[in-house]
Each structure stands twice: as structure tokens, then as C-alpha cells.
Image (spheres, helix red, strand yellow):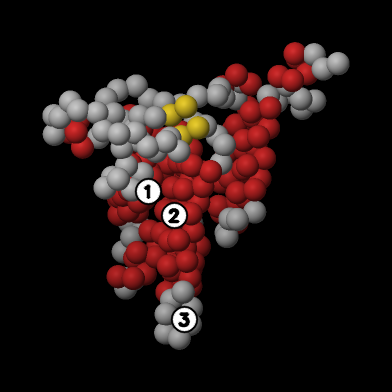
Amino acid sequence: MTSESDTSEDASGNSPEMDAILSQLDELESTMTTAAQQRELRETKELLERLPGGAFIDEQIDKYTTRDIGEAIVGSIIFALPLLVEDGVFEIAEHFVTFLVFGVPVFFPLNIAFVLLLTTKILYVVDFREVRITNPILGVIPRRLVGVLGASFLTTAGLMLMWGRLFAEDPATIEILARITVIWAAAALGASLGDILPGESKGTDLTISNLVGDDDDSPTEER
């Protein structure tokens, strides 16, 4: 017979929810393309393992608020800062724009696609929390996905500009964008985790109707 304590924690002392999260992070680590990204993810796992077992609860997330945007920005900064001092970012960006296949820098758009896929998977596929798509933009595009990607991209670009890493060594325009996307990969990961791990934020849901003062509720689309 299995006791209640046996079902709440395994032999490692982690709750089943925590073990599921760590397992999903292990799968994500195998998709990382650079050592820096893998290192950041390992550090994230170590941080999660130090959290109290009750830190993760089965909580559904419906609203998207200004606090969520703030959490995404903080997560972006935490994950982006270690890479801002790495000259390897320049080498990777140069590789993105100089490795050509039939004249096309294939790794540059592939890296952007990787960031989009990684962020979407963390928010809506990996079972950190149940995140529902409500009031999507134009009825199709998830607000949270746009917010996380936008906040992490702008935070990355702003930090690189402020720290003098954007225009160093006089790069071409496409290489400037490539530099941003290198660090954006880590920043988007941090923004995703920073947004959803604390759970649903308090405050007014950011919808078009709320922004223009319309009190009518829009239909909710479940994920």
C-alpha cells in the first residue's frame, strides 16, 4: 500500500510536480544549441531544486497583466546579463550571417525559429502550469507569447545598446540583428520562466476591450 507521504514526495525528496518540471527541463537542455544556453538551463534547474517543495502548485493561468510583462523583463535580464560580457556572442552572430547555403544565411532564421519554438513550448506545451489562451490578438495570436517574445527582445536590445555590445567593431546591420538574437535565445527562456512560474498575476487583464474602455467580455479560447 502506498501512503500519502509516498505520493507527495519521491526518494529524492522532490514533489511529483517538481520532478515533472525538472524532467521537462532535461528535455529542453537536449535542444539547446550552445554551451552558454545549456549552462543557463542547468543553473535554472539548480535554482528550482533549492525551492521549497510546495512552491509549485497546480494553478491555471488565464489573465495577462502588466505584472506579467514586468516578470518577463526581470527574467530576461537575469538570463541575458551573463552573455553580455561574452565575446563568443560576436563569433556566433558572425557565423549566423556568413554561413551561406545558396547565398542564404540559413542559421540566422533557424535561430529565430528556435527562439519562437522554445518559447511556445515552455508556455503552452511543457507542463509547468496550465496556461490558457484567452482573448488572442486578432483571434489567433496568443497575447502572452507576443508579450514574452517582445519583452525579451526589447530588453536584450536595450541592454546590448547600454553596455556597448550592439555596435562594437562596426558590424553590418544584419550582424547587429544576429547579435541580438543570440542573447535573445537565453532572454526568451528567462522571460518565459519568469512569467509563468510565479503563477497568475493580480491586476487588470490586458485586453483590447480593457484598453479602450469597453466593459464587454470577449470570448475565451481555452488551451
Of 150 and 62, nearer the camera is: 62
Picture quadrant where residue 113 is located: bottom left
Which residue matches tag 2? Answer: 116
Mark 2 vs 1, N-terminal side: 2
Q: Are marks 3 and 1 in contact (CB under 8 Å)?
A: no
Q: Residue furthest left?
A: 213
Say few, some or many: other residues with alpha carbon within 10 Å of mark 3 (under 14 / 14 to 19 / 20 or more).
few
What amino acid type should be assigned to the residue bearing mark 3? Answer: Leu
Point out which mark residue 149 bears: 1
Q: Residue furthest front?
A: 219
Residue 70 seen anywhere in this rendered image of the structure = no
In this picture, residue 40 sits left or right of residue 79: right
Q: Are marks 2 and 1 in contact (CB under 8 Å)?
A: yes
Q: Residue furthest top?
A: 4
Say few, some or many: other residues with alpha carbon within 10 Å of mark 1 (under 14 / 14 to 19 / 20 or more).
many
* Image position, residue 82 (x, y; %): 48, 47
Which residue matches tag 3? Answer: 100
Q: Residue at position x 46%, y 81% from top?
A: 100
Q: Secondary structure at mark 2?
A: helix
Of 174 and 119, nearer the camera is: 119
Residue 63 seen anywhere in this rendered image of the structure = yes
